[in-house]
Image: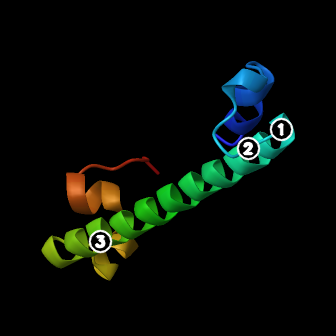
Amino acid sequence: TFLVAIFAYTMGGVQDLPKGITSVGEAIVHQMGVQLLGIAVTLVWSAVLTWIILKLIDLGMGLRVREEEETEGLDHAQHNESGYIF
């Protein structure tokens, strides 16, 4: 995503510059800022929604098994099977 800023203006030409931008270098730096903003917004959006989803799951059914099930082993506690025969 970040490299779009470089490739967008090195493949085009001076005629493709946005209004108010006078050089290809200035256009690349401007577009890098736009791309970084997009990356930051995407990271924050993903983190916030992931947190909300995890909280909803935790309220509904919980994210962890009981401590007794952990000690016993999840193969036996949840599936009534032995994962390893010793």
For marks 1 and 3 on the same chain, the one whose residue lies earlier in the sequence:
1
Identify residue type, mark 3.
Ile
Label 3 CA crowd tier, 10 Å (few <14, some 14–19, many 20+): few
Q: How many marks?
A: 3
- What residue would you read off at disc 1? 23
Q: x, y percentage for residue 14?
A: 78, 25
Across and down, in percent, residue 5 comes to 71, 38
Which residue is found at the position 25% from the left and 63% from the top?
Answer: 77
Q: In the rendered image of this protein, does residue 33 appear above or below residue 22?
A: below
Q: CA distance from mark 1 to mark 2?
A: 6 Å
Q: CA distance from mark 1 to mark 3?
A: 44 Å
Q: Is residue 21 above or below residue 24?
A: below
Q: Nearer the viewer, residue 41 or 83?
A: 41
For residue 61, side relative to residue 47 (left or right): left
- Picture coordinates of residue 66, whole percent (x, y): 27, 78
Q: Is residue 3 left or right of residue 55?
A: right
Q: Residue, x 18% and y 78% (percent of image)?
A: 59
Residue 64 seen in render? no
Which residue is nearer to you in this view: 41 or 24? 24
> Between residues 1 and 70, which one lies in front from this camera angle?
1
| Rendered position, 43 above or below 59 | above
Looking at the rendering, which quadrant does residue 67 occupy?
Answer: bottom left
Is label 2 in a helix, a strand or a loop? Answer: loop
* Image mark for residue 52: 3
Residue type of the residue flagged with mark 1: Ser
The crowding category of the residue bearing disc 2, from other C-alpha atoms within 10 Å (few below 14, some 14 to 19, many at least 20), is: few
Q: Which residue is mark 2?
A: 21
